[in-house]
Image: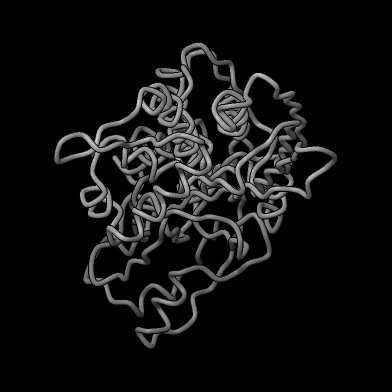
Amino acid sequence: MITPAKPSRGRSRSIVVVMGGADSSTMFFRPVMGLASFLTEHLDYQKNQSCNARIASSKMVAVLAYGCNMPRSLDFNQLLTLEILLEEQSVVRAARRLNTSPATISRALARIRDDFGDAILVASGRGLAPTQYALDLLPRVHGVLESARGLYDAAPMPDLRAMTPRFTLVLAEAVIEAYGTSLADAIWKQCPGATIHFLDEVPLQENERLRRGEVDLYVGVFGTIGPEIMRQTVRSGFTKGAVRDDHPLLSGPLEISRLFKYGHIMVSRDSNMRQPIDDVLARHGSSKRRIELVVPTYAIALAMLRKTDLILGLPDFLMSGSHIDKHKIGFLSDPTPTAPFDIFQAWHPRLGKDPVHRWLRETVQKVIAQ
């Protein structure tokens, strides 16, 4: 809304336009500057040549001051009504498009005529026709309104092939082992100048790293996400019992009770000694499994599995490939319970609408969801 200030000496008047909720970016000031130019050239039509416009701007406020007579008030809704009136050249049709009554549009037209000092629409036969001034005005009205509407549009996607961004991602160890190469290839395919930094998880610190901007994206499995952090599931899976290929459990009938005669390996980077498989076993009324070895990575766990009688809960996306064949791993058959899990990606909400970050998230989702 444009609000007139108190009149100063003579007949001059100032107008202050306050637009909040944005920063000083070019996208924010384009409609403001367009409106300033529009006002300078078209308002107070009779005395336009005597206007002495001064424009000042700050991060949250744009001030337009004019040393000439100006209309009582003008807002973007009024400009929208003017645009539709000139397009339809009919009060009734304009009212229909704006979902209001013809009487309301007639009153708006009267205010527009008073503000612009021009008839805008005049009688012509049984209809209305725009004045020459109104025809000259229409392209500028279009421009100002389109700029204002553009504030609601998503930021345009830049040319990824011309960029050299640095992407810092924290990936759970199993995720980077399974998808790291494919993910890097997918990023470089569209953004060849990118530098990719894969970081290890730091338990209990991922939320703070996202908040401080040290990490662009966290891709995890069992992490705890802060209340304001955005989260999206990119793949669901399950863990299954894995043992060395000549393990006693692979011969003879398999009962759940036999699982508890052997120790288990847990992959964990913190002190958390409980994983989804424990909840599954509890629902089966089974005893608590015995954790005999905790290691930080699945690569170490698989190497240890080959030389022990221990059992490892292995994610399904790690159940194939050369690393399984190399370690000669077998999988426990039904009725051994499996534990579901989700691979998710998490990011700070300040990056939610950033077009490059949105592309990065979409790339991660496509690679992992395959």
Q: Residue 208: image x %, image y %?
A: 72, 53
Q: Residue 158: image x %, image y %?
A: 48, 21
Res. 367 in view: yes
Identify which residue is drawn at 75% across, 34% down: 65
Above/below status of 282 relative to 16: below
Outermost residue on the left side: it is 126
Towards the viewer: 216 or 171 = 216
Towards the viewer: 36 or 362 = 36
Identify which residue is drawn at 70% across, 24% down: 51
Towards the viewer: 313 or 98 = 98
Above/below status of 362 relative to 224: above
For the C terminus, which image quadrant? top left
Give residue 85's quadrant in the image: top left
Outermost residue on the bottom side: it is 285
Q: Residue 260: image x %, image y %?
A: 43, 76
Res. 172 in view: no
